[in-house]
Image (tube, grey):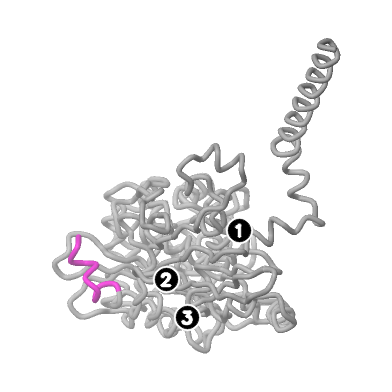
């Protein structure tokens, strides 16, 4: 009898071991298979079964949650949704997540193991903590100034702290209310169809996801390359630049929108945006040095994240001399995001290094305990410190005496560069208006803000479009940052 009991006990033990092995197999080895099965809705139900954590701007939440009472219980809400959409993105039960809502989804949804006291146990049990908080670097006054400045037009603004790389403003217009995509009703489906089919593409983040020909703002990069390469030494010496300039190996003649560009000095050429001078400078500097300098500013970097991905800005490494001439004035295949051009302005405003731009200051638990904090880092050294100093002098002249006078701020030192980028078949489209700039408070030891503005539907023509359409927007953003005491902190 005892023998049979032992056998039964052994069988039960084997069954128990088999059960435990299967549990481990299901919970750990095969978990991804079951979790990824579209028929299993438990994960999504649990995902929306509690409020998401908040995204903060200026210490206040710009997101929230509302109880719908449905299967996917809590829907996302947004304060000033169109204003902050290029920062937050959307979190939708039907259409997923984008931008910060996507990049920090685990933290906001409460699934990040860092939110749990015992991460291993949290991972094994699939427990869900209260969603954490994402604290952004956005300056609310600068964000609103950029948004209101662009109102009624298509374009984008990116503003950085040139010392740390903190993103102070990130605006894209036309925009949309991400709250329209929260929920599961037919109204959400209608909103998606309307937004997705809108030819103005309101869900496109033009500040980081779209590249434009940077036009004459790229002349800052060309000047940096020429100065570092020793092609230019004296900023006031005449150059050998005919007007018009015949592109090497062609019969195509490049002209200017202003007079006085024949053999003009680099100072005059930047202040009044002489195409011929910088086309010739780019050719003299050479494609290798131009490509190297552009890459040092961040061009052709496909891995930039802020923390969501940024479209790659480009400068062709292989091109003939005629193409190089055009690339050196921001045409041909040269393309840049507004964020990239804000990085260019930041490098000039500082010591010649490019700070890594970042949008998340820190993340915390719901109780306020810090989980992570971003430390400022340098991406590259774009130019020598002396070159940056000379470019600051040149860009200050653009605002004080040249095409960028609309960006001047009383009591502050402002440097800038206008740009007009042609596009369309035969350059028939209305030029994009660009302006990049930086500003330093009167008594501050370092600049507080660097800005890039692009206006897609600029109405002004010729060399004044950047100064007429984009410069006033940049000025309002810089004033917002300088006005809130940012300059005094330095």
Q: Marks 1/3: CA distance?
A: 44 Å
Mark 1: secondary structure: helix
Q: Are marks 1 and 3 in contact (CB under 8 Å)?
A: no
**How many numbered circles does the render carry?**
3
Left or right relative to 157: residue 315: right
Mark 2 lies on residue:
61
Q: Nearer the viewer, mark 1 or mark 3?
A: 3
- In percent of width and height, residue 61 lies at 42, 71
Q: Is residue 184 left or right of residue 151?
A: right
Mark 1, residue position? 323
Is residue 1 placed above or below 354 in the rendered structure?
A: above
Q: For the residues carrying marks 2 and 3, which lies nearer the camera in this image?
A: 2
On the rendered image, what quadrant is the C terminus found in?
A: bottom left
> Is 280 or 388 nearer to us in this picture?
388
Q: Going from the N terminus, do you reach mark 2 or mark 1 first?
A: 2
* Residue that mark 3 sits on: 80
Q: CA distance from mark 2 to mark 3?
A: 11 Å
User: Given the current orientation, which residue lies at the most extreme left position?
Assistant: 443
Secondary structure, mark 2, is strand
Q: To which quarter of the image does residue 91 belong?
A: bottom right
| Mark 3 neighbour density, 10 Å: few (under 14) some (14–19) many (20 or more) | few
Residue stretch rendered in magenta on the structure: 481-490
Magenta residue check for 483 = yes
Which residue is depicted at the point 58% across and 59% down?
Answer: 102
Main SS of the magenta segment?
helix
Left or right: 368 in relation to 296: left
């Amino acid at each position: 009898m005892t023998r049979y009991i032992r056998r039964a006990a052994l069988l039960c033990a084997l069954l128990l071991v088999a059960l435990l092995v299967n549990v481990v197999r299901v919970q750990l080895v095969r978990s991804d298979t079951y979790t990824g099965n579209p028929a299993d809705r438990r994960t999504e139900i649990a995902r929306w079964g509690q409020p998401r954590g908040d995204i903060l701007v200026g210490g206040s939440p710009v997101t929230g949650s509302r109880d719908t009472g449905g299967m996917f219980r809590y829907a996302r809400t947004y304060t000033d949704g169109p204003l902050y959409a290029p920062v937050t993105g959307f979190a939708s039960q039907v259409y997923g997540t984008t931008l910060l809502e996507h990049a920090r989804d685990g933290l906001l949804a409460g699934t990040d193991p860092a939110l749990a006291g015992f991460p291993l146990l949290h991972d094994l049990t699939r427990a869900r903590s209260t969603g954490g908080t994402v604290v952004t670097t956005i300056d609310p006054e600068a964000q609103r100034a950029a948004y209101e400045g662009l109102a009624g037009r298509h374009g984008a603004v990116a503003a950085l702290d040139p010392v740390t790389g903190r993103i102070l403003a990130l605006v894209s217009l036309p925009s949309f209310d991400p709250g329209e995509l929260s929920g599961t009703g037919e109204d959400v489906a209608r909103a998606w169809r309307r937004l997705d089919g809108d030819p103005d593409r309101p869900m496109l983040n033009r500040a980081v996801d779209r590249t434009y020909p940077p036009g004459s703002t790229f002349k800052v990069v060309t000047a940096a390359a020429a100065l570092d390469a020793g092609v230019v030494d004296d900023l006031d010496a005449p150059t050998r630049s005919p007007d018009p300039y015949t592109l090497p190996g062609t019969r195509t003649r490049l002209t200017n929108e202003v007079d006085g560009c024949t053999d003009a000095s680099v100072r005059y050429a930047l202040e009044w945006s002489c195409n011929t001078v910088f086309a010739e400078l780019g050719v003299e500097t050479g494609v290798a040095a131009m490509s190297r300098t552009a890459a040092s500013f961040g061009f052709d970097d496909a891995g930039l994240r802020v923390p969501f991905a940024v479209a790659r800005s480009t400068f062709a490494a292989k091109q003939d001399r005629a193409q190089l001439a055009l690339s050196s004035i921001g045409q041909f295949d040269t393309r840049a995001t507004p964020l990239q051009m804000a990085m260019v302005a930041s490098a000039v405003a500082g010591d010649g290094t490019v700070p890594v731009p970042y949008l998340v200051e820190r993340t915390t638990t719901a109780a306020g305990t810090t989980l992570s904090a971003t430390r400022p880092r340098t991406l590259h050294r774009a130019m020598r410190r002396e070159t940056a100093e000379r470019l600051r002098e040149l860009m200050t002249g653009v605002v004080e005496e040249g095409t960028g006078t609309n960006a001047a701020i009383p009591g502050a030192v402002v440097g800038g560069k206008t740009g007009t980028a042609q596009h369309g078949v035969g350059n028939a489209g209305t030029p994009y208006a660009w302006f990049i700039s930086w500003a330093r408070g009167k008594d501050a030891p370092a600049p507080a803000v660097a800005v890039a503005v692009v206006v897609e539907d600029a109405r002004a023509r010729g060399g004044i479009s950047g100064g007429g359409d984009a410069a006033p927007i940049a000025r309002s953003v810089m004033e917002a940052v300088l006005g809130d005491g940012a300059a005094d902190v330095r």
